[in-house]
Structure formats: structure tokens, C-alpha cells
Image (cartoon, helix red, strand yellow):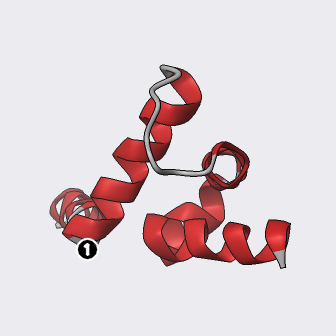
Amino acid sequence: MKFLVIPVILASMLFSYTDQDWKVYNGCKAKVYDGKNNNYDYEACREMLNHKSALKKYGAESSYNYWIKRLYK
């Protein structure tokens, strides 16, 4: 029974992010790791991607917005 519960919990965590979270996450990954020129801020993306625990807990959109406010206001 324990072996069935763990994958269900992991799957629910993985799919709990919104489409906007995935858009921000993928855009930031492209900006930081691939050097793509997009509308995301490099420093905010870099910080967001470096703080994986906050990214997992709050989602990409919220984490990105947090770093924009923290870095520039």
C-alpha cells in the first residue's frame, strides 16, 4: 500500500502547477540556460531557478514575481 501512495503524492505535486507556471518556468529556463532572448528578466529567472525549494512550494509565476519585486523595488 505504501508503494502506491508515494507515486500518487508525487504525481499530484507535479501536476498542481498552472499553465502559467509552466510558461514562466520554461521561459526562464530558456533565458538562463539557452540564452534565448525573451521578455523574462535574466536575474529574476536565475534567482528563481537557483531557489528550487521555493519554486516547488510556490510555483514559478509567484517565485518569478517575488524576485522581480525583491531585485528592482
Image quadrant for the C terminus?
Answer: bottom right
Horizontal side of 56 relative to 52 (left or right) equals left
Q: Position of residue 40 (x, y in %)?
A: 51, 51
Judging depth in this view, the residue of 10 and 68 nearest the camera is 68
Residue 54 in view of the camera: yes
Q: Is residue 54 above or below residue 7?
A: below
Image quadrant for the N terminus?
Answer: bottom left
Horizontal side of 43 relative to 40 (left or right) equals right
Q: How many marks?
A: 1
Residue 9 in view of the camera: no
Where residue 27 sits, quadrant-wise, is top left
Q: Secondary structure at mark 1?
A: loop
Q: Position of residue 66 (x, y in %)?
A: 67, 76
Residue at 45% in and 70% down: 61
Q: Residues within 10 Å of mark 1 (few under 14, many from 20)?
A: few
Q: Position of residue 44 (x, y in %)?
A: 68, 55
Residue at 63% in and 67% down: 54
Q: Position of residue 46 (x, y in %)?
A: 68, 43
Residue at 46% in and 64% down: 60
Q: Which residue is mark 1?
A: 16
Amino acid residing under circle 1: Ser
Residue at 50% in and 64% down: 56
Where residue 4 sits, quadrant-wise, is bottom left
Judging depth in this view, the residue of 71 and 58 nearest the camera is 71
